[in-house]
Amino acid sequence: MPRSVLIVGAGPAGMSAAIEAQARSARVIVVDEAARPGGQIYRQTYRPSTGGGAIADSGELARKERLIGAFERLCDKIDYRPSTAAFALFGSGELHVANGARTEVLHADSVVLTSGVREIAIPFPGWTTPGVMYAGGVQALLKAQSVLAGRRIVVAGAGPLPIVVAAQLLRAGGEVASLATLNSLAATARELHALWKGRDIVLEGLRYLATVIRAGVPRLSGFVPVRVQGREQVESVLLARVDRDGSIIPNTEREIACDVVAVNYGFASNSELALMAGVAMRHDQPSGGWVPVVDEFGRTSVPGIFVAGDAAGLRGALVAEAEGRIAGAAAAEREEIKSAQFRVGLSQDLAQRERLVAFQSAVQSMLRVPTGLWRLATDDTVVCRCENVTASALRDAFAAGHLTPNTIKRVTRAGMGWCGGRTCLHAVAALAELHGAPDAGLMTPRPLARPVTLAALASLDASSR
């Protein structure tokens, strides 16, 4: 009897897993929050006539069209459920999902989590002012709606994403007032061997950078946003140079007029469902914080649960594709045939993943965030937006000896709101470490991992019980 494979997420890893599992005769279900497949990196416009994909590099567009085309040709052979949120997962493989005004419980022989990552921002005075956005959010508006987030935008942060977003804004006709990058590209250039392994991606990055340079955008290396001015809306941002420890260097401040500040300091793994199911975790800050422990086939410590793509560690779309195929194959086959022959059949994907993971070591150097940046938050800076918890309230809790995420949550309500800590957890843990906390781990995940209406919970599909 064919195995059933349930895949959470329809980004590069999820689509690849579905294609591979179906090719091995598995019964495949794919649930994804978005209305169309692609994930964040291959996000599709909701208005095809606008041609929103033209902002992306030609190499990325070719990969996107190839993979999405293959997945869409598969959709009449699988159970594909867009606009569906997975909000709970248990070790038995029982997945709870919500679609509109109803919920359902799904069961499968194997569950493959390809839920990706979320962005990280470092709280600083004024970061909750309307007009301060994640860089990925600015990018999503461009990709999905062909909409510019503002008239005059400052892009800031660490890693390659700020460069990509600045270039895509320019290609869409936007004005980028400044590009402030925390880490110099020179740090990456020192790892030539690793860069060579991902040379096609490096060339794409250089083309994005060339767009920024040709446009004459002021580029500030080693600068970060330290304060936003504006009461009802962003009016300007104060940038300052920081040293290697993250402390502001005196007399380096520059104020730049703008109406949007797009920030990104890396990513954190969307690991809530894996942890809820009892999967063993490991901490690797540069590659996504707390990530599931997986073997070479994506298997976790819980039988039948697999993790692939950026949800298993930040390594980019090409690794996610290869890893999706590997996990999809393993999820579709029975444990007893994980043999040498099985490995030979996946040798090309295993080799591609190994090569590109080596390349990602160079990218990781761009994501280094010094500890001192977390001191930018003043006492009245809101850290937990959902519950309006300030840095002062958190510091009082730390001083009283509350240093683990669960106790901080109980004492201050940080992480108890709408997002379940997805936005503030990283900042809370970093601030706690500044006050002597050990590596505190994650808050205990509880259903609901995604917001679901009470009406939907009350409308559980009886056939799925």
Image (cartoon, rainbow, N blue to C red):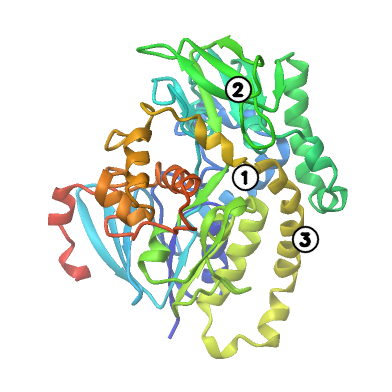
Q: Give residue 139's quadrant in the image.
A: top right
Mark nearest the camera among 2 and 1 is 2
Q: Decide: marks 2, 1 in contact (CB < 8 A)? A: no
Q: Is residue 191 above or below residue 86?
A: above
Rendered image: mark on residue 65: 1
Query: Looking at this view, is 168 or 220 the one in front?
Result: 220
Q: What residue type is labelled 1?
A: Glu
- Where does the image place residue 348, in percent across and percent down from the top left? 75, 69
- Quadrant in which the C terminus is drawn: bottom left
Q: How far apart are marks 2 and 1 (CA)?
A: 21 Å
Q: In this view, does 9 lie above or below 274?
A: above
Q: Residue at 83% across / 48% down in the picture?
A: 191
Q: What residue type is labelled 2?
A: Leu
Rendered image: mark on residue 355: 3
- The residue that label 2 is drawn on is 169
Q: Residue at 50% across / 36% down in the picture?
A: 121
Label 2 residue SS: helix
Label 1 residue SS: helix
Q: Residue at 40% across / 65% down in the picture?
A: 275
Q: Which amino acid does label 3 sit on?
A: Arg
Q: How many marks?
A: 3
Query: Looking at this view, is 392 or 174 the one in front?
Result: 392
Query: Looking at this view, is 458 or 129 the one in front?
Result: 129
- Where does the image place residue 357, in percent across and percent down from the top left? 71, 58
Q: Distance between the residues labelled 3 and 1?
A: 23 Å
